[in-house]
Amino acid sequence: MLATGDYPTHPIRQPDPIQADTTPTPRVLNIISSVLEKLVARNDKLVEVLTEQPDGLNLDRNGTISAPLGKSLNAFHGVRAPNISIPNYLERIYKYTNCSPSCFVLGYVYIDRLAHKHPDSLLVSLNVHRLLVTCVMVASKVLDDVHYNNAFYARVGGVSNAELNRLELELLFLLDFGVAVSSQVFETYCFHLEQEMLINGVDRKVERVISPVAVDEIVTDIG
């Protein structure tokens, strides 16, 4: 198990004034956006249906979802859904942080692990943005040789530095610090994302920016 102090010690980029990267948007962002948009739309409808049931959801004074759904992701819930769409939010993170496209695959892996570890807690429009920026930031610390610090990611993601620090710890504990991914698992998720697009009649391939050897080395270093 990864201990709190065992985070990779990669160099941290200096938070220069925010300036967008002009390189084309990687295909993987569009693929993950499409998958997550469908999932969030489905879960939002489920929450709406349950809310209408007499014995359905209970909402506290802040509107936070409670039983019968789980509370594991409540730390990531906002008061209202952000105006920015999932595709535009992911593109913003990519363009301003210049993290590798593989970070988004790894971030998706973390979200899927959360879904399996906490199946009663749903990815919805109130929490998806905070989860995304937190997961991608953690992934960049795992994968990228050089990455921006939490304060810069917070600025890009539209949250405070203090909140993102708290969300990072929340995510790590929810994952039991399981942030390492083998090359086989990484490739499996890439294939899964490609198959999801094929179901919709779109043939798109996920960029394999890092080699399987590199991922295996990550597992060796921090596992």
Image (cartoon, helix red, strand yellow):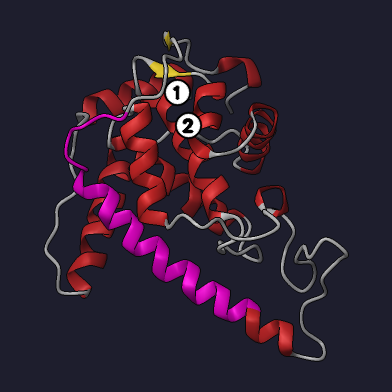
Using the rendered image of the protein, determine whether residue 108 is visible from the camera's viewpoint: yes
Write the start and end of the magenta stretch as one range: 20-47
Q: Residue shown at 27%/37% (left/top)? A: 101
Q: Residue furthest left?
A: 203
Q: Residue furthest bottom?
A: 54
Helix, strand or loop for the magenta stretch, by majority: helix
Q: Is residue 50 magenta?
A: no
User: Distance from label 2 to label 1 (Cα)?
Assistant: 7 Å
Q: Give the residue type that dot 1 points to.
A: Lys
Q: Give the residue type that dot 2 points to.
A: Met
**Residue 178 placed where, x, y %?**
54, 36
Depicted 158 relative to depicted 38: above or below: above
Q: Is residue 183 left or right of residue 203?
A: right
**Residue 195 placed where, x, y %?**
22, 64
Q: Nearer the viewer, residue 175 or 75?
A: 75
Depicted 8 relative to depicted 92: above or below: above
Q: Nearer the viewer, residue 201 or 129?
A: 129
Using the rendered image of the protein, determine whether residue 182 is visible from the camera's viewpoint: no
The picture quadrant where one finds residue 154 is top right
Q: Residue shown at 16%/39% (left/top)? A: 24
Q: Which mark is in front, 2 or 1?
A: 2
Residue beneath disc 2: 137
Q: Is residue 77 left or right of residue 209?
A: right
**Residue 57 placed where, x, y %?**
77, 77
